[in-house]
Image (spheres, helix red, strand yellow):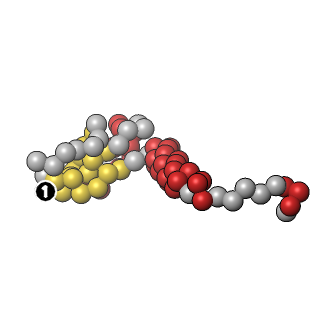
Amino acid sequence: MQQIFAPFSASISELRKNPKALLEKAQDDTVAIFERNAPAAYLVSPAQYERLLNRLEDYELGEIVKARQAEKPFAVEVLLDDL
């Protein structure tokens, strides 16, 4: 059985019937949308989506920092006056 990453779930037909009620019920939580007893999609609020994008951006920036720290032994020291 596939793991579900949401505290709420609904079928695609429930989503089609009354999407607003589904979003109100879930508030700011994720909703797993099922089709034939398997998750077909996840529905998130705009605020939650923005938080996810921010966390992803922070992770990507962290990876850039790690890569650049690994290059530090090859750096050439330069004085500001020499620029």
Count the labels in the image: 1
**Which residue is painted at 86% across and 61% down in the image?**
82
Q: Nearer the viewer, residue 19 or 36?
A: 36
**How far across and how far down the image is residue 73, in percent?**
58, 54
Q: Is residue 15 visible?
A: no
Q: Identify the image quadrant of the C terminus.
A: bottom right
Rate crowding at label 1 as few (under 14), some (14 to 19) or many (20 or more) other CA atoms within 10 Å: few
**Which residue is painted at 21% across and 53% down in the image?**
39
| Identity, as a three-letter code, of the amino acid under mark 1 | Arg
| Residue occupying the far right of the picture | 81
Q: Mark 1 — residue?
A: 36
**Which residue is painted at 27% across and 43% down in the image?**
5
Rendered position, 80 above or below 6: below
Q: Is residue 26 visible?
A: yes
**How far across and how far down the image is residue 49, in percent?**
46, 49
Q: Secondary structure at mark 1?
A: loop
**How far across and how far down the image is residue 42, in percent?**
32, 51
44 to the left or right of 68:
left
Please identify the quarter of the rendering in which residue 41 is found: bottom left
**How far across and how far down the image is residue 48, in percent?**
46, 43
